[in-house]
Image: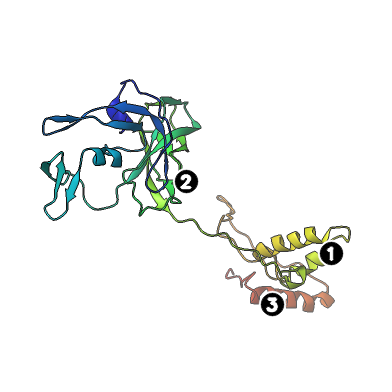
């Protein structure tokens, strides 16, 4: 039974934990005795009250005790020998129902601050086809104006989770118990890459090997092996040669000369013996794309 349906009615403690058919653990607030009315006939029923569902679910024991028979051919259900015609609930179809998380208690987020909200997970569909190892993620959501929900990974087998939010306003924001924080989306967990147990410093790229060769002899072999793996994983940030400088697109350097006019300055004379070396260096830099010919006059 959804907790929001019960309201403030008194509950009795549950004698055992509540699990869904896919072994998902549900948060149980207690049990309550409520009659189910079928064609004017009141049939007693014991319901577990939980915040993790949003529709009433009749258990197998109740269906057995009341002789419920579902006739798929005629789309009818017989309860205590009374036949009832099944109807499609408005707004429902065969698509996968959306999961969401709601606040467990009333909470206030101070201005310009972050907070981790304790939430309950609402499962709109609990069937055996859904794996108990399902992983979920919050969406980029704003439950109220000025409150942003961060991406949070959630274990699909848990009935509760902590969700990080950020109040970007200059005023406190309050959420009441049961407020929807974010819809939940299924995500796929990537298997971690396995390190090569046969890898050794000798198999490192050529431009990384000199760094390892200069390692102090007192460094243990296992530490040196870990250093080699670290350097290999970041080998792209080390220059492979004198001219492997590359460029970045993260920032752009700009020289603001304001209203100053450019002026021409002659090259400073260099010793004649150095000119071939300078010319060779400039040719190498131009060939590797470090410099380019000047177009000014």
Q: What's the CA distance linking mark 1 and mark 2?
A: 46 Å
Is mark 1 in CB contact (under 8 Å) with mark 2? no
Q: Which mark is residue 100?
A: none
Q: For the C terminus, give its image quadrant.
A: bottom right
Reading the image, the residue beneath label 2 is 155
Q: Which mark is residue 214?
A: 1
Residue 69 in percent (x, y) is at: 18, 46
Q: Residues within 10 Å of mark 2 (few under 14, many from 20)?
A: some
Q: Is residue 186 left or right of residue 230?
A: left
Along the line of sight, the residue nearer the viewer: 110 or 13:
13
Q: Is residue 269 left or right of residue 111?
A: right
Reading the image, the residue beneath label 3 is 283
Q: Nearer the viewer, mark 1 or mark 3?
A: 1
Q: Is residue 45 above or below residue 244?
A: above
Q: Is residue 85 left or right of residue 29?
A: left
Q: What's the CA distance linking mark 1 and mark 3?
A: 32 Å
The furthest residue to the right: 218
Looking at marks 1 and 2 on the same chain, the residue that comes earlier in the sequence is marked by 2
Q: Residues within 10 Å of mark 3 (few under 14, many from 20)?
A: some
The reply to whether residue 171 is in sight is no
Q: What SS does tag 1 mark?
A: loop
Q: What's the CA distance linking mark 2 and mark 3?
A: 59 Å
Q: Nearer the viewer, mark 2 or mark 3?
A: 2
Residue 249 in percent (x, y) is at: 55, 59
Looking at the image, which residue is at 11% across and 30% down? Answer: 40
């Amino acid at each position: 039974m959804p907790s929001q349906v019960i309201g403030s009615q008194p509950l009795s403690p549950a004698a055992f934990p509540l699990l869904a058919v896919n072994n998902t653990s549900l948060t149980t607030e207690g049990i309550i005795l409520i009659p189910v009315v079928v064609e004017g006939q009141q049939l007693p029923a014991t319901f577990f009250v939980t915040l993790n569902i949003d529709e009433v679910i009749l258990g197998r024991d109740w269906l057995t005790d009341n002789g419920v028979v579902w006739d798929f051919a005629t789309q009818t259900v017989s309860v205590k020998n009374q036949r009832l015609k099944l109807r499609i609930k408005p707004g429902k179809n065969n698509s996968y129902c959306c999961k969401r998380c709601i606040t467990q208690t009333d909470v206030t987020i101070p201005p310009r601050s972050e907070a981790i909200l304790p939430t309950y997970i609402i499962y709109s569909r609990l069937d055996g086809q859904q794996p108990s190892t399902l992983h979920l993620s919050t969406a980029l959501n704003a439950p109220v104006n000025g409150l942003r929900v961060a991406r949070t990974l959630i274990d699909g087998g848990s009935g509760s989770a902590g969700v990080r939010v950020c109040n970007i306003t200059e005023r406190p924001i309050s959420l009441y118990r049961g407020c929807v924080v974010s819809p939940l989306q299924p995500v796929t967990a990537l298997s971690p890459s396995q390190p090569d147990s046969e890898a050794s410093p000798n198999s490192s790229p050529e431009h990384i090997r000199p760094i390892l060769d200069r390692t102090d002899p007192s460094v243990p072999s296992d530490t040196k092996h870990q250093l080699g793996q670290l350097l290999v994983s970041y080998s792209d940030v080390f220059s492979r040669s004198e001219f492997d400088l590359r460029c970045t697109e993260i920032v752009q350097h700009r020289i603001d000369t304001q209203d100053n006019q450019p002026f021409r300055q002659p090259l400073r004379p260099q010793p004649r013996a150095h000119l071939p070396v300078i010319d060779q260096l400039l040719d190498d830099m131009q060939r590797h794309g470090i410099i380019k010919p000047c177009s000014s006059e």
